[in-house]
Image: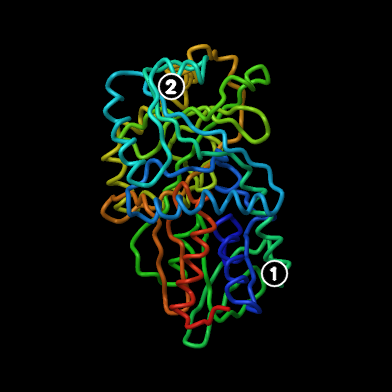
């Protein structure tokens, strides 16, 4: 198993459950697990409001809410179902809010329309014309969930190998050989959930999907302790349909504090958590890829706006003050950022659903967009079933 994020660890966990006695090793290039997308997200257990009915995202998210909560209960991991409010702040957003309501209903989500009066009653410090209340949305620390999954894998005899970056893969009819540092590891089959490196691992295996990972940095701020009780729910804007991301929101964190974010700006490195972090290799690969150039041309205006909001803190604050007018610049304290791995096809399509590729002896999670953390258990179950069918393994 390549990848020590929550999707890779969930898949390894499902494999050891479905195929008792199987020999499993998880290879993670970092010195610790869950260093990237898993440990740098909003910590939200998403209910599945936004996703196209019938899509894998909708299916996995719906299943993932209860699966995540059940896993947390079994492993004594703190979580809270505080609910989420999507708030319309201007009249133009009301039709979009209604469309979201209909989509949520189509996805079987427990959602309630609330008017301005009820919004004020539930959230006295939030301003809006109305909203959608999604009761099952929750919060958790996904890094803790991932570590608990790793413990399960280890208890079942699996190996968790950190500081183990895969540099070369050779597949033949009898198996797969991986070069990991100075070592060579021989495996019968390989499953990869490599996140920000998914396309590179796929290319090493010769996967026939013409795509690249394009990194988008999500920047957050943390509110001071005096704002720990500013909201009772998670507060989200009504998303702009012309943008691929959800917009800046107020998020109660399981640690008791509140964050603001994220935005979505092009990162200059796949692990570019700071504005000044630049990888010439990553930039060169993006620039040479026709799909990336098409994405930039199609989103030039919105990308420039996002970059301006990133560089000018007062512009970022203005996004928050649309629904929380009491916030001031002094309330926005630095907080860690994240980078989202966005798969882009050669024709410029940004892949919004899960994308899986394969070779004769390997399976690859090529795109695992939000809500991948919420959906990690059903994703792992899906990959384990796929392995059973493809590789001819017998489940217990």
Give the quarter of the figure containing the C terminus: bottom right
Q: Quadrant of residue 253?
A: top right
Q: Position of residue 314 (x, y in %)?
A: 48, 16
Query: Badge 2: how crowded within 10 Å, few (<14), some, or many (20+)?
Result: some
Q: Nearer the viewer, residue 144 or 291?
A: 144
What SS does tag 1 mark? Answer: strand
Near mark 1 (Cα within 10 A), the count class, few <14, some 14-19 or many ≥20, is: some
Q: Which residue occupies the extreme right position in the image?
A: 155
> With respect to residue 43, does 27 lie above or below?
below
Residue drawn at x 65%, y 28% as measured from the top left: 257
Residue 104, percent from left and from top? 36, 41
Mark 1, residue position: 159
Above or below 228: residue 84? below
- Taking the image as shown, residue 215 lies to the left or right of residue 95, namely right
Q: Is residue 124 left or right of residue 17?
A: left
Is 243 in front, or is 210? 243
Image disc number at residue 319: 2
């Amino acid at each position: 198993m390549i990848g020590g994020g929550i999707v890779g660890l969930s898949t390894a966990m499902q494999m050891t459950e479905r195929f008792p006695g199987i020999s499993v090793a998880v290879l993670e290039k970092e010195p610790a697990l869950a260093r990237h997308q898993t440990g740098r997200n909003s910590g939200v257990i998403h209910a599945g409001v936004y996703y196209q009915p019938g899509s894998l995202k909708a299916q996995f998210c719906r299943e993932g809410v209860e699966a995540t909560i059940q896993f947390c209960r079994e492993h004594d991991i703190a979580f809270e179902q505080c609910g989420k409010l999507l708030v319309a702040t201007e009249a133009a957003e009301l039709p979009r809010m209604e469309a979201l309501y209909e989509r949520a209903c189509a996805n079987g989500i427990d959602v309630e329309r609330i008017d301005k009066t009820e919004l004020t009653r539930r959230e006295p410090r939030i301003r809006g014309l109305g909203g959608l209340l999604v009761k099952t949305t929750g919060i958790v620390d996904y890094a803790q969930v991932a570590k608990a999954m790793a413990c399960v894998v280890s208890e079942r005899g699996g190996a968790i190998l950190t500081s183990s970056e895969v540099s070369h893969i050779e597949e033949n009819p009898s198996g797969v050989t991986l070069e990991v540092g100075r070592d060579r590891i021989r495996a019968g089959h390989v499953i990869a959930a490599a996140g920000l490196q998914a396309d590179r691992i796929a290319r090493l295996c010769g996967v026939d999907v013409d795509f690249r990972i394009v990194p988008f940095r999500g920047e957050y701020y943390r509110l001071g302790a005096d704002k720990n009780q500013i909201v009772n729910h998670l507060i989200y804007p009504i998303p702009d349909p012309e943008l691929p991301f959800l917009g800046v929101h107020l998020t109660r964190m399981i640690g008791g504090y509140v964050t603001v974010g994220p935005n979505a700006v092009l990162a200059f490195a796949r692990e570019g958590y700071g504005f000044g972090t630049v990888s010439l290799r990553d930039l060169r690969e993006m620039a040479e890829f026709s799909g990336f150039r098409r994405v930039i041309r199609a989103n030039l205006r919105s990308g420039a706006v996002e970059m301006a909001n990133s560089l000018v803190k007062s512009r970022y604050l203005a996004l928050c003050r649309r629904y929380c007018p009491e916030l001031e610049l002094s309330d926005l304290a630095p907080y860690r950022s994240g980078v989202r791995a966005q798969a882009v096809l050669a024709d410029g399509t940004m892949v919004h659903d899960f994308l899986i590729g394969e070779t004769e002896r390997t399976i690859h999670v090529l795109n695992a967009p939000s809500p991948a953390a919420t959906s990690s258990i059903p994703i792992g179950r899906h990959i384990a079933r796929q392995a059973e069918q493809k590789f001819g393994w017998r489940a217990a």
